[in-house]
Every structure is written in C-alpha cells, then in structure tokens.
Amino acid sequence: MATALLLRIRESESRAVQKEIEDWEAEQELTESFGATFPQERVLELLSQIQTVIDRQLLKYEEDKHLLSTGLLALMQNKIHNIQNYGESLRKIFENNIEINRNLQELIQTFSSRGYSPNRIEELDLATGDYRRWKEKLLQKWPWLDHEQLKKSFASFERGHFRALKDFLDELQHPANS
C-alpha cells in the first residue's frame, strides 16, 4: 500500500517538474522570438533554478533506485496486489524521468552554448541511461497481463475445456498416476 502511494507521488512530482521545464522553454522561446536576450541577472537565476532541478532529479533517481529494488523484492515475495498497475506506474515514472532529463539536457546545452554550465551533468546523463535500461528491462521482464491470452483462456473455459481442481491437485500429490 505504501509503495503504491509512493508511486503515485513520484508520478505527480515528475509531471510538476516537466511543467516547470516547459515553462522555462516557453519563456526562452518568447524572449528569442522578440529578438531579445535574457539579462545576465535572469540567466543566472534560470541557471540556479536548473541546477536545483538537476540536484532534485538526481535525488529522485536515488529514490527511484530504491523504489525499483523494493518493488522487485515485493514482486518476488508475491506481495504486490495489482501487478499490472504497479508495472504501469514504474513505466510512467521511468518514461517521465527520461523525458525530464532529456529536456534538462537540452536546456543545459542551450546554456552551455552561451558559456554557462551547471554542475553534475555527467551524473544526470548516467541517471538517464539507467532509466532507459530500467524501462527496457521492465517492458521485457515484467509479468504483464496479456489480454489476448486471457480472452482465449476465458473462451476455452466457457467451451468446457478445463480440468477440475480435484484432478489437478491429485496429479500434484501423485505425479505417477498422471
């Protein structure tokens, strides 16, 4: 239960950071469309805000590493009640952070081309790579529900193609009799 709540909080936080980045990009585009440049004071303010977001993203990255390991452990212990939703939440968190980090990297590149460079860029790149790998492994290895297979199973059951539970349990207790 607590992990599911943490997943929802992380999704919400990711959307808020994404909105913040989109606002900066819109401000930059608007300023440039009028042929203006940011005053030095505003550039330094934005750079400080971007550094804060980078630091926050790296902190969230560490939290997400823990969240992932906790989730995998809970999965192995059969303690996740809604596996599909849990997997979807992890996927969204990974995708959101990949997108946020990509947008941050574009902003960093814009500032770097003007002679300003935030700290911890390499760490952000490594975190982005991990998010991509986590997402890829999640998509490949997570026990996703296959809705087509479920439809086929239900249809087969409705046609009467199933084994009685008693027969199945007898076979488990006495494998030589099967």
Image: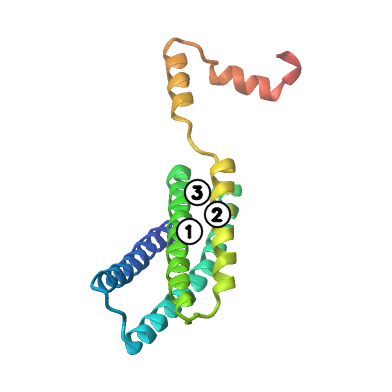
Contact check, label 1 and label 2, Cβ < 8 Å: yes
Q: Residue at x 48, y 58 (%)?
A: 98
Q: Is residue 113 above or below residue 81?
A: below
Judged from the image, the secondary structure of the residue bearing numbered disc 2 is: helix
Judged from the image, the secondary structure of the residue bearing numbered disc 3 is: loop
Q: Which three-letter amino acid code belongs to the residue tagged 1?
A: Ile
Give the residue pinned by disc 3. Answer: 80
Give the residue pinned by disc 2. Answer: 132
Which residue of the protein is positioned furthest toward the right in this rendering?
Answer: 176
On the rendered image, what quadrant is the N terminus found in?
A: bottom left
Q: Which three-letter amino acid code belongs to the residue tagged 3?
A: Ile
Label 1 packing within 10 angstroms: few (<14), some (14-19), many (20+): many
Q: Which three-letter amino acid code belongs to the residue tagged 2?
A: Arg
Residue 142 percent location from the top left of the image: 55, 43
Q: Residue at x 52, y 15 (%)?
A: 162
Q: Quadrant of residue 132?
A: bottom right
Give the residue pinned by disc 1. Answer: 98
Q: CA distance from mark 2 to mark 3?
A: 23 Å
| Along the viewing direction, whichever of 98 and 163 lies nearer the viewer | 98
Q: Is residue 77 above or below residue 59?
A: above
Which residue of the protein is positioned furthest toward the bottom in this rendering?
Answer: 41
